[in-house]
Amino acid sequence: MMIADNCRPCRKRYERIIVLFTIACLLTTPLMAQQNPDNGQTAGAKTKTGDGAPELTAKASQAIDKGLKYLLSTQKKDGSWDSDGKGARAVAITSLALMAFMSKAQFPGSGPYAKQLDRGKNWLLKHAKERPDGYLGSVMYEHGLATLALSEMWGMTRDKKDDDAIQKALEAAVEVIIRSQNPGGGWRYQPQADGGEDTSCTQTVFHALASARQAGIMVPNETITRVVKYLKGAQNAETGGFTYNPNGKTGVSAACTAGGAYSAQLAGQRDSEMVAAAIRYLEKQSQSIINNTGHYYYAHYYAIQAMVQAGDAHYAKWYPLIRDALISKQKSNGAWDQGKAGGTSYSTPMAIIILATPHRYIPIYQR
């Protein structure tokens, strides 16, 4: 696998130094606003950037910290996280948990959780070394999330050996994605080029592929072109929403629409009518989507990023709604509960990532 930008790890280390140097001031701003009555703000009041985009409230920042502490309490001795305490979906949940900490600029080897995150990173790399075929996890959802975590960790660790190991695992993981793309442009549960395709799996896998390409891994233009072709076929012409099946006729959902829109944006279609129609669909359904939509945390994980890419006018309307909704849904122990469909294992890190969107520390979540 060729690397498009070999200096990326060095550049990322420099950026990391800057981030870690300023993070204490940046992250205590909401708390200062809460504690200092003379600054004109009250607890929970909105803070904004110069362009009017909404930023974190004190309550949102506190919810993130509480959620991260919950994740620390559920980390296993071997460094992993899982969905049932017995190792189920450990690759996916560990990857999401690491991403949740990174969304607040907490990286392996640095900060107050350096040792815990190092253990998580080491577990993921150990799993990658045990899979010489490059396939991470047991389904392509897991593989996509693991590839994403590796991509966003690359260049952000203290040890060059770790960076080299991450690069090797990332290259192999991307090879799996490229060779398993179906003729229609999408992916399904297993890494088979003849295994079918669906929008949900496709958006998870392509999200990772876009991150890797942004990081410097060579991804063929043909792969991107085929993804765009798939997305066009999966969009419902009447509503603008995306369907689960790649025929664009039945089964429009918020989760597929949000992920479809975000995937199209990452594939270079940000200013297309395809994306504009999907954003209109989401905003028209905003009340029901924010309150209670299927696959709630998964849907909003993609919806907030689609709004970021759509521009500040869209993001400024959407983020406060989901921010306040998530704060109200957080449990007293710091977790977010998906219920029988998934418990707290994946909903908690996804909720943290959504709430932490204003930080923009993770490159793939930046516009």
Image (cartoon, rainbow, N blue to C red):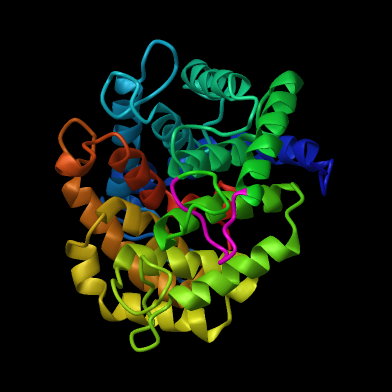
Query: Of residues 172 and 28, which is closer to you in this image?
Result: 172
Q: Residue at x 54, y 44 (%)?
A: 191
Q: In this view, does 159 lie to the left or right of 340?
A: right
Residue 246 belongs to magenta span: no
Quadrant occupied by the C terminus: bottom right
Residue 81 appears anywhere in the view = yes
The quarter of the displayed image where residue 93 is located: top left
Q: Which residue is drawn at 65% across and 49% down?
A: 179
Q: How many labels does the image show?
A: 0
Residue 55 appears in the picture as rendered:
no
Instruction: State the image coordinates of residue 323 (x, y, percent, origin top left).
Output: 30, 56
Question: Which is nearer the eye, 160 or 217?
Answer: 217
User: Where is residue 348 drawn, in percent x and y?
Assistant: 30, 39
- Across and down, in percent, residue 57 comes to 33, 53
Left or right, 199 with reference to 290: right
From this viewpoint, which residue is outermost toward the front?
194
Question: Farthest residue toward the top?
Answer: 77
Range of magenta residues: 180-189
136 versus 46 height, above or below: above
Of residues 324 and 354, the one nearer the viewer is 354
Q: Which residue is drawn at 30% across and 73% down?
A: 252
Q: In which quarter of the image is the N terminus?
A: top right
Q: Main secondary structure of the magenta part?
A: loop
Q: Is residue 82 above or below residue 328?
A: above
Q: Nearer the viewer, residue 146 or 65?
A: 146
